[in-house]
Image: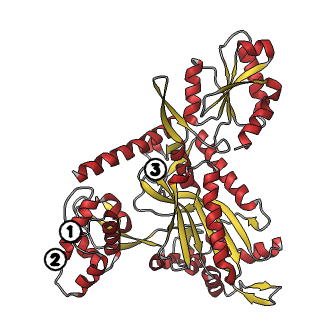
Amino acid sequence: MEDTVIEKKNKNQNDVIDKIVSLSKRRGFVFQSSEIYGGLNGCWDYGPLGVELLKNIKEEWWKFMTYRENVEGQDAAILMHPRVWEASGHVENFTDPMIDCKQCKARFRLDTLAEQISDKKKEKALMELSQSLNEGSEAAEKLGKLYQQGTKDAEVISTAFDAVIEDKELSPLLLNKLNCPQCGNAGTFTSARQFNLMFKTFIGPLEDASAVVYLRPETAQGIFVNFLNVQSSSRQKLPFGIAQIGKAFRNEINTKNFLFRTREFEQMEMQFFVKPVEDKQWYDYWKKERLEWFKSLGMTPEKLRYHDHPKEKLAHYAKEATDIEYLFPFGWGEIEGIHNRTNFDLSRHQEYSGKSLKYFDEEAKEKYVPFIIETSAGASRSFMAFLVDSFYEEEVNGEIRSVLKFHPRLAPIKAAVLPLVNKDGMPELARKIDDDLRPFLKVFYDDKGAIGRRYRRQDEIGTPYCITVDTQTLEDQTVTVRERDSMQQERVKIDELLTYLLKKLNSK
């Protein structure tokens, strides 16, 4: 019975994602990369509306982060000296544990396998593992600390399952009790193996070890190695930040959930350099600031939360860390990370490069390596979260209306200009209005089909305002302005239209 409920729930979640993927292709938000050749898994192309939405998200982030006195911008190269990635720990540590099904050859990330297994099956596997271990053995004692037989609390079982499957000793034993989510066969998993996620390429004509470089897996390292360049050229004093938006690449073995996990993506990162004794106050400050940014752009507050990392699961560089998570149809997923990276990064680059990255504090008359508070948001994941959050289906006059309720500042098209009919001078006047607005706003002209159908087309792509030129326009030079969410209409004079729209678009 429980599995049936889970299957139904998963089907409903998949329905929502399927509708969004379909809308994205049909209306020009996102296309599968190289689709005419069968596509390239984990890579996506942004269409006419998608590139506008993505640009708007990045612009809002850039303004929020850098239009302040103590944050500077930069744009570092994608290709960097290979020693950068040795110093950062990526060559050694940037790996995912992967397992294969020997029967169907499917490959899974060990740390996300649990997402594909029901709570009932997790409980069964843990119970079978517990019963198979010799009482008093080291493995049995370790399991006993993580899982108590008879526990029915789903969250407790899920937490125990995650801990056991990541334990080097217990993981192979638990995997032997599980069925492959793909083919259903039991006991067919290989042992976990580590796969480095960085894309490797070569610089110059020779493809040998001396020419190896990597496509950056994050933009942060470009900021760290430029710390003193930016600080000295901008004459900044601590605390101050460096922000960057740019492409990053990760050789994800299993990409899934549309744009959530891809191999090529954009990051919006800011590294904030602080005095070591002030790390906690700035960590708390940026944690609050970043959550409020998503809310300020209309994201549903109830679908946002912090997920603080427990100390035992912190990254090797982190003193404290949290994820801002959004409730996607498939569950909670990270859209931004805030980390206290201590002085790990600058210290490592100082060690590996042999160049001092210490900051001279004029007030304290001392040199030290600053601590770093990182805010790292995925532009692609933010795009998906805003897209999902804005998607609504609602009944209007007995029909289903699909609408993207974007915040006006994010909407790809700000206004549509629609002549009521293609005669009586209405198209000519509508074109004149379109020409007048276009230098200031992204607008769309549409004269095809009934006016109701045109409204629905604009609703589906999230256009906040539709401007209709009708019979009354010819009489008094006013137009009908229809607001997307409320569908309320208002008469506005043509010569006041631009001011009216700009005020509306910037007031929320």
Relative horizontal placement of residue 2, taking residue 447 as reference (left or right): left
Measure the C-alpha gap from mark 1 to mark 2. 10 Å
> How far apart are the alpha carbons under marks 3 and 1?
30 Å
Tag in front: 1 or 2? 2
Residue identifier under label 2: 132
Residue 177 is labelled as 1
The foreground one among 47 and 77 is: 47
Residue situated in front as seen by the camera: 156 or 404: 156
Q: CA distance from mark 3 to mark 2?
A: 40 Å
Residue 158: x %, y % from top left: 33, 66
Q: Earlier in the sequence, mark 3 or mark 2?
A: 2
Quadrant housing the C terminus? top right
Residue at 63%, 57% in the rendered image: 292
How busy is the neighbourhood of tag 2: few (under 14 within 10 Å), some, or many (20 plus)? Answer: few
Callout 1 environment at 10 Å: few (<14), some (14 to 19), or many (20+)?
many
Residue under label 3, please give it: 258
Rendered image coloring scheme: secondary structure
Q: Is residue 105 visible?
A: no
The answer to whether residue 10 is seen in the rendering is yes
Total numbered labels: 3
**Mark 3 touching mark 2, by CB under 8 A?**
no
